[in-house]
Image (spheres, rainbow, N blue to C red):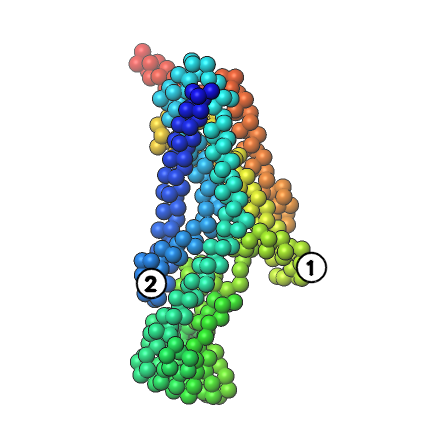
Amino acid sequence: MFGFRQIHRQIFKELAVSFLLCLGALLGLILIGRMLQLKELFLSQNLGLVEIVELFVYLTPFFLLLLLPISCMLAVFLTFLRMSTDNELLALKAGGVSLNQLLAAPLLFCALVTLGNVGVSFWGVSWGMDNFKATVLEHASSRTKLVLQPGVFNKEFPGLTLFAQQVEPGGANLGNVFVRDETKPSVPATIVAPRGKVATDTEQGQIIFLLNDGHIYRQSDGKLDVLGFDSYAVRLDLTRLMGGFRLGSDRPKEMSLNKLRELENDPATAELWDGVFLKKLKVEIQKRYALPAACMVLGMFALPFAFSFQGLKQHLGLVLALGCFLVYYTMLSIGFSLGETDTLDPRIGLWIPNALFAFMAVAGINMAGKERFPHIFERLSHIRFRRKAASTC
């Protein structure tokens, strides 16, 4: 019993280390890509390192939903591929330890990763995105009020030139305001108003310059149009700085599972976007269940899969495992598309990949336990050797 505990402890330790390395590498690559997409936000808002790290912490759950299954699969595959290649499994088998007796550690590991992804799926994604949007708007609002200096032309924001002769602390009130709005290049406008203030629209993710009792000047086709107004809002949509992230109303993939369920059961949801929104909701709900389950399914699939490629170098095994995940994700993406177009019920389309890989996992573990699983890499090496010998003769 003590010997088995030691074996399971060592396997679990190696699984955890491989998992953290894979997850850290994949997450790092994605966050670097997002950093390039969000560079305009960082530069325009002059964010420091602490603020950037804070934003990326809030973004992390959004990516973990998909990264946890692939990292779990890679950890199990690489761990047992190494044990198989180094003949550790052969030594254990010679000592009377069967494959079924080694399943406890990977099963526990996959179960823990699955539980972690359940938390990310049900609550983590919405928590992260809510805090991300709120933090960006807070920084943008603070920065806007900070850069507005009396008597200074400000061009911090793309497409807008701002000037105010008087500025109260915090942007509560502006006096003698001039705005050059080129956010719509086809109809640039010059706005002049004696009074104004800065506000934030958290629902739409916008910074708003509210102007009163002014005039709008537009020139087109050699004509100058002048329009007076009592109240006018110049809106700065921060979405353009977000590299694809919208700061307005939540999309289904940014909501918590409870919120998704509430909207699904709301009769008014069926009328939004001519029913398209409801279809997206249903797909997203099944996705929130399917991806956590994928941690267990793909992890168990990787176990016999590693045995079949005994002797394969780990960097080649990594590429092979990523290829298998690509097959899984392609099937999942097809399920997304078919579900959103109402061609196939998402309860079927999004669970077919899990069902197929689960079947292969059970069959593979059963064959490996009976030592009937094909060692593909060894057979390929043997065929190559025979061909080389035949060509020599």
Give neighbour class at mark 1: few <14, some 14-19, many 20+ (Cα, 10 Å). few
Q: Which mark is residue 267?
A: 1
Q: Does residue 157 appear left or right of residue 130 in this picture?
A: left
Say whether residue 387 is visible: no
The x and y percentages for residue 129 are 48, 57
Which residue is most to the front? Answer: 2
The x and y percentages for residue 291 are 53, 42
Q: Which mark is residue 327?
A: none
Mark 1: which secondary structure?
helix
Which quadrant of the view contains residue 179?
bottom left
Q: Amino acid at mark 1?
A: Pro
Residue at the spot x=54%, y=29% of the render?
360
Is 257 situated above or below 273?
A: above
Residue at the spot x=42%, y=88% of the render?
194
- Along the viewing direction, whichever of 30 and 120 lies nearer the viewer: 120
Say whether residue 116 is visible: yes
Mark 2: which secondary structure?
loop
Is 225 situated above or below 242?
A: below
Kindly identify which residue carries mark 2. 47
Residue at the spot x=37%, y=43% of the render?
24
Q: Does residue 228 appear left or right of residue 44 in this picture?
A: right
Q: Give the Cα separation between the discs numbered 1 and 2.
A: 43 Å
- Along the viewing direction, whichever of 309 and 148 lies nearer the viewer: 148
Q: Amino acid at mark 2?
A: Leu
Is 32 situated above or below 361?
A: below
Q: Earlier in the sequence, mark 1 or mark 2?
A: 2
Which residue is most to the top? Answer: 393
Q: Nearer the viewer, mark 1 or mark 2?
A: 2
